[in-house]
Image (tube, grey):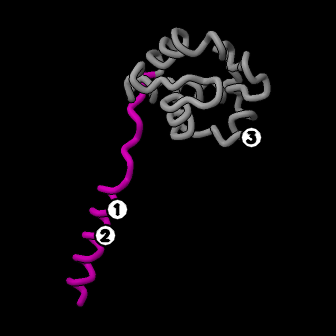
Amino acid sequence: MKKLLSILLVMFAVLSLSLTRPALAVDAASGAKIFSANCAACHAGGRNVVMADKTLKKEALEKYGMNSADAIINQVTNGKNAMPAFKGRLTPAQIEDVASYVLGQSEKGWTK
């Protein structure tokens, strides 16, 4: 019985680890360059020139449920309202880099 339980626990652990999403391997310098080239026209300094209240500042990201890499990746990939989709223009890795950059800058208050 102990052996069976041990085997089940090991199988559960292996299955759990294989189903978890790997950590994002992001490049902050790349994220900054991509943001500058593709996003800064509307979001310079974390602002939003189209919808002034929906900034990239920490408080706004939290208020609108955009304070996670997954939420930002989805928004950048698919676009929404006036924001264009970047799927096909940026690679998934570049979009992950931008998401990481945005979250990092929001934590810093958009200061370098």
Q: Which mark is residue 12?
A: 2
The residue indicated by pointer 3 is 63
71 relative position to 10: left or right? right
Q: Position of residue 103 (x, y in %)?
A: 59, 30
Alpha carbons under labels 1 and 2: distance apart: 6 Å
Q: Which residue is mark 1?
A: 16
Label 1 is placed on what type of residue? Ser
**For this view, does 107 lie left or right of residue 8?**
right
Q: Position of residue 78 (x, y in %)?
A: 51, 32
Residue 17: within the magenta? Answer: yes
Quarter of the view holding residue 1: bottom left
Dot 2 amino acid type: Phe
> What type of secondary structure mainly makes up the magenta span?
helix
The amino acid type of the residue labelled 3 equals Lys
Q: Secondary structure at mark 3?
A: helix
Q: Position of residue 48 (x, y in %)?
A: 71, 20
Residue, far bottom: 1
Q: Earlier in the sequence, mark 1 or mark 3?
A: 1
The quarter in which the C terminus is drawn is top right
**Nearest to the observer: residue 79 or residue 4:** 79
Magenta region: which residues? 1-27
| Mark 1 secondary-structure assignment | helix
Q: In this picture, is 13 found above or below 5?
A: above
